[in-house]
Image: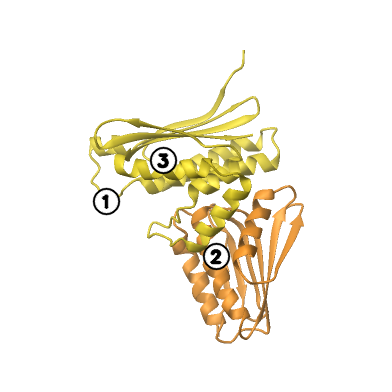
Amino acid sequence: MEEEHVILSFKGLVTAELLASVLQIMETKMESMDESPKTKKKVFNVLVECLQNLYHHVDDNTINTQESIERKSALVMISKENGVFTIRTGNYIDIAKASDLKERLQIINSMDKEGLREYYQTSLELSMISTKGTAGLGMIDIARKSGNKLDFEFLTINEETSFFCLNVKID
Amino acid sequence: MAEILFLEASAKTPSVSFDPITGKLELRGRSIPENSIEFYKPLNDWIDQYAETPKESTTIDIKLEYFNTSSSKCLLDLFKKLERLNGGTSAVHVNWYFEEDDEDMEEAGEDYQAIIKLPFKMIEVEEI
């Protein structure tokens, strides 16, 4: 029987402290793994972008009530099966933002390696950095580094909210 | 004149060594802060000040293990400042280091090379 080995999983608020801890744990765990430095770096790199996407996605202006904490919580799971790493994330997102994101992900998935390179370079050159420090390059970078198509799904929760699932494979 | 800028590396930021006497600049380690602007602003400000009385030749060594996309935009801004400096009073060279087999970092260097008009030297090393 093929077994999927969960390396790390988390559900909750993504804070800067949590992000630092998850990265440190993953780094330590990967040190003892029999993987090429190249793969380890890719996993780490993609994980940084995924976690920072979750971190920046959270709107800090709202007061934390039980409901808002639930709404801002995210899921992260890192697993390895037959030498392939999978990074899964899940987070709530406004329906309006979800359709934009879906469109961007479809564009990214329609591109080959060379197309992604050009798309990244153009986006890097033209992008303005937001006050949050994001440049809108995260998903392109994740797709480039993973070398695989991004597997995603949007689950409708209610009229305003959708749940965004992203699966990234690194082999 | 700009004073030497030296910062120790942290878990999320690279070490920085910008020396106005030798014209040698170096970034080394990883650059993955959530918000890079805060970290890179003093570096960009330093280059503005250095550009007032630069050395004839300026070299920047980029020895990064990896960087996030937030840093990639800040790095571009830094290279753009150096690009302007290169057009004026100092000859600027970029040494882009990457570890053996690390095609991601090699490609990252090529991305900047495609955008920035500065001489890039790609240097493959065993370990950064």
Residue occupied by mark 1 = A61
Q: The yellow chain is which one?
A: A
**In the depicted view, which residue is nearer to us: B26 or A106?**
A106
What is the number of the mark on residue B76? 2
Which quarter of the image is occupied by the C terminus of chain B? bottom right
Shade of chain B as shown in the rendered figure: orange
On the same chain, marks 2 and 3? The answer is no
Image point (73%, 47%), residue name: B101
On the same chain, marks 2 and 1? The answer is no
Q: Which chain carries label 1?
A: A
Q: What element carries label 3?
A: helix
On the same chain, marks 3 and 1? The answer is yes
CA gap between label 2 and label 1 equals 30 Å
Residue occupied by mark 3 = A102
Is residue A30 visible to us here? yes
Residue A41 occupies quadrant? top right
CA gap between label 2 and label 3 equals 28 Å
**In the depicted view, which residue is nearer to us: A10 or B70?**
B70
The percent position of residue B48, horizontal first and vertical second, equals 52, 79
Which quarter of the image is occupied by the N terminus of chain B? bottom right
